Image (cartoon, rainbow, N blue to C red):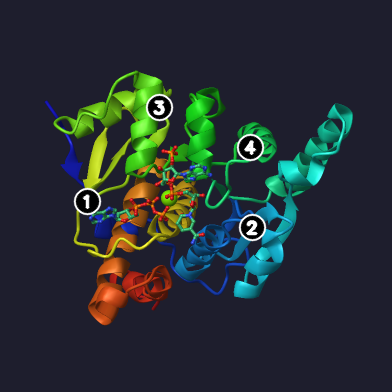
């Protein structure tokens, strides 16, 4: 029997969104890093990183390949872009030893910054190059060492599905699979097919089997579980399914998770799980912004239109003053 309950996303948004206070300094509202962006995909990391800023984070970094960096920089001067990731084709003539050195350098470039980040988003537009994914595995291990939470999406989920130990039993990991990514996770981890009759129970079992990570299963309703509880967010979104909406979500989860962690660490009486709160808040806000963008743009609604509605949607729920 399923015990999925609908979350009150607006109340969660009000709870976790910090008030704007002149005493706060730059960085206190969140420093986010997106690990993603390669030759093929530059939109996805941009959408995730800019969404984090539009919601209210102070700094948003992108760690991407050298080819992707100038493109992503040209979309926005607001983002801090590090052209540090390498794909196999740039090192095809290298010896094993030289490849190992390149990997060390890539991971070292991210390590320099790791301690300052409140949350990483790993995967939007990352691609599936084997050398690049090896480096990203090391970056995940590093994040775990520093206790930095991370959201795994897109090609990050392709990596994790094939190496589940990377996230296993890390309570600060959030996975945000779409329908395809979820199917692959269920097949790999549970060795069965997706059960559409018992979605909540299956999601809870999956999260439990991965050691209590939080999973946000995207779809008509977004379903969220950490292996214990299952919450849904079903408020009306938009009938447009243009690519990139999942990227907005991953950047948003990172911000709300950071804010929830901050809130909970300052209030011992709050026993809520910050990853669950972050997922509920992000899902609620994205769906509200998608609905507003659709009202304005109808069939021509694009991901950038939804990003343009994030601020107005949050303002409606938590006015700045
Ligand atoms: N504007 C942008 O820059 C956007 C970029 N985006 C970025 O796109 C990436 C993929 O995300 P997505 O959502 O298209 O993945 P999904 O629905 O599982 O795949 C659909 C089908 O394609 C296939 N397939 C995918 N990649 C493959 C590969 N490298 N090589 C071979 N096959 C591949 C896949 O096949 P399968 O995995 O089932 O074998 C499935 O059948 C990810 O980095 C995302 O962030 C999006 O966020 C949108 C906006
Ligand atoms: N059938 C649906 N009906 C209503 N909303 C949906 C539906 N499917 C997805 N969504 C909304 O869109 C958001 C993004 O989900 P989607 O499945 O498009 O992710 P994705 O495939 O990873 O996107 P991206 O193109 O960024 O990779 C979800 O959080 C959800 O709120
Ligand atoms: Mg996606």
Q: Circle 4 — which element?
A: helix
| Residue 276 position within the rendered picture, expressed as x and y whole percent measured from the top left | 36, 42
**Pointer 3 residue:** 212
| Residue 77 position within the rendered picture, expressed as x and y whole percent measured from the top left | 65, 75
- How far apart are the two marked residues, 4 and 3, measured between alpha carbons? 24 Å
Q: Circle 3 — which element?
A: loop
> In the image, is the residue at mark 3 within 8 Å of ligand 2 by its beta carbon?
no
Residue at the farthest left position: 1
- How far apart are the two marked residues, 3 and 2, measured between alpha carbons? 28 Å
**Pointer 4 residue:** 133
Which of marks 2 and 1 precedes in the sequence? 2
| Residue 144 position within the rendered picture, expressed as x and y whole percent measured from the top left | 61, 33
Which of marks 1 and 4 precedes in the sequence? 4
Up the image or down, 104 lies above or below 265; here it is above
> In the image, is the residue at mark 1 within 8 Å of ligand 2 by its beta carbon?
yes
Q: Residue 62 carries which label?
A: 2
Q: Nearer the viewer, mark 4 or mark 3?
A: 4
Between residue 38 and residue 229, name the one nearer to us.
Answer: 38
Q: Residue at x 50, y 36 (%)?
A: 158
Q: How many numbered tags mark residues here? A: 4
Label 3 environment density (alpha carbons within 10 Å; few <14, some 14–19, many ≥20): many
Q: Which residue is drawn at 17% across and 41% down?
A: 5
Up the image or down, 15 lies above or below 91; here it is below
Label 4 environment density (alpha carbons within 10 Å; few <14, some 14–19, many ≥20): many
């Amino acid at each position: 029997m399923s015990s999925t309950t609908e979350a009150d996303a607006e109340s969660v948004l009000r709870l976790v969104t910090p008030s704007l206070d002149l005493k706060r300094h730059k960085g206190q509202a969140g420093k986010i890093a997106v690990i993603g962006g390669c030759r093929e995909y530059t939109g996805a990391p941009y959408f995730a990183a800019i969404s984090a800023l539009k919601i209210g984070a102070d700094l948003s970094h992108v760690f991407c390949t050298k080819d992707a960096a100038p493109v992503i920089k040209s979309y926005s001067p607001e983002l801090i872009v590090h052209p540090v990731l390498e794909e196999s084709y740039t090192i095809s003539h290298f010896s094993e030893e030289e490849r190992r050195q390149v990997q060390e350098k890539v991971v070292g470039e991210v390590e320099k910054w790791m301690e300052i980040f409140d949350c990483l988003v790993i995967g939007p537009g990352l691609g599936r190059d084997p050398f690049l994914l090896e480096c990203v595995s090391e970056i995940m291990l590093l994040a775990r060492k520093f206790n930095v939470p991370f959201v795994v999406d897109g090609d990050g989920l392709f990596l994790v599905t094939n190496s589940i130990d990377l996230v296993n039993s890390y309570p600060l990991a959030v996975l945000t699979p779409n329908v395809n990514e979820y199917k692959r996770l269920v097949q790999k981890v549970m060795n069965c097919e997706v059960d559409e009759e018992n979605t909540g129970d299956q999601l809870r079992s999956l999260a439990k089997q991965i050691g209590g990570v939080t999973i946000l299963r995207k779809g008509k309703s977004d379903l969220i579980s950490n292996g214990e509880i299952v919450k849904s967010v079903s408020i009306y979104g938009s009938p447009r399914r243009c690519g990139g909406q999942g990227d907005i979500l991953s950047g948003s989860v990172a911000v709300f998770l950071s804010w929830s962690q901050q809130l909970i660490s300052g209030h011992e009486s709050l026993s809520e799980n910050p990853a669950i709160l972050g997922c509920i808040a992000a899902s609620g806000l994205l769906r509200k912004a998608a609905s507003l963008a659709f009202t304005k743009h109808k069939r021509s609604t694009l991901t950038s239109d939804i990003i343009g509605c994030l601020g107005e949607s949050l303002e409606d729920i938590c006015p700045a003053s």
